[in-house]
Amino acid sequence: MQKSQTIGYLFAIGATVAGSSVYIFSKAAFAEVSLAQFGVYWFGMAIVWNTLFVLRKKTNRHIPDIGFSNFKKLLFIGLLEIIATSSLFLAIIKATDAAIPSFLRNMEYVFITIMGVILLRERFARTEFIGILLTFTGVFIISYDKNFSFIKYTTGPSGLMLLSSVSFAARTIIAKKNILNFSPSTLAINRSIYLSLASLIALLFLNQDFSIPETAFINIAVGSFLGPFVTSICQFSFLKYIEASRGAIIQSTTGLFVLTGAYLFLGSLPKSYQIVGGIITILGAVLLITGSRIKYRKLVQKDLKPAKKIE
């Protein structure tokens, strides 16, 4: 059991490290290419990596009949992915440091919790409520600007990450409700297809060039391999050995890995108060995940409690 848990934690750490590379390599690539150029290559390569991974098994070498109903669900998930991911990368472009969007993405845990309460009519656990307050406190600190304006906020990293986090949370809830209809590989390839098509349309509409500098291509190739591909494999792998909540706690620390990587590879650091705010968002995310886990255990224990004997 201990050995299995150790393997699970190693996969979770691997997913976190690989996921943090998205912020670093994309930030480096955006210094030389536009968002449309970036998306065509990044998600085009992601399709290749994920398809090769799926085709390694002979049983997967056929096109499944998903049906019109499931196609509509994949279409809706794909549209949410376009909104969420384009907002994420726009935030990375506009942020002074790659670590800032990674800290702000912890808002996703808040919106997943809120949507779960609304859709499932649950109550907030006390720990979850404290986690939400801490997360938004950290977000407020990171986003602090003495020259604040609504337009500046909505078009800046914080506003873009708010839109991204809400869209990612909605995507996660819908994907979870339909997880029996779609394999993880189907969802990963579906995401890459919609995002690469959206990027290609934007590239053609803006009349931008397909050719990009060699250094940008290398950053995109490495980042697309570590991000959409290795991260997905590690995420699905740690679920075999440890609870999803344990892996989520580790992944909520992505900002710390991005902070270290951005300093080592890009030579940049956020302001000291933004680092403090980022750490607070991590604490908030950990409390949210822990609170959800405690609430789930109580519900399970309640369901398993033996009924009173009737005499």
Image (cartoon, rainbow, N blue to C red):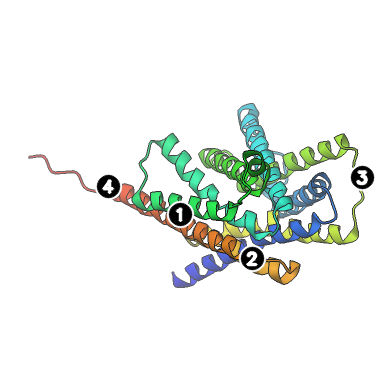
Q: CA distance from mark 3 to mark 2?
A: 32 Å
Count the marks: 4
Mark 3 Cα within 10 Å, few/some/many (few <14, many 20+)?
few
Question: Is any atom of residue 245 visible in this view?
Answer: no
Marked residue nearer the N-terminal end (1 or 2): 1
Q: CA distance from mark 4 to mark 2?
A: 42 Å
State the mark number for residue 302.
Answer: 4
In the rendered image, the residue lying farthest to the top is: 68
Mark 4 Cα within 10 Å, few/some/many (few <14, many 20+)?
few
Q: Secondary structure at mark 2?
A: helix
Question: Is any atom of residue 241 visible in this view?
Answer: yes
Q: Horizontal placement of 44 versus 114: left or right?
A: right
Foreground mark, 3 or 2, reads 2
Question: On screen, 122 above or below 214?
Answer: above
State the mark number for residue 32.
Answer: none
Please tell me which residue is depicted at 51% across the width and 59% down the height of the picture: 282
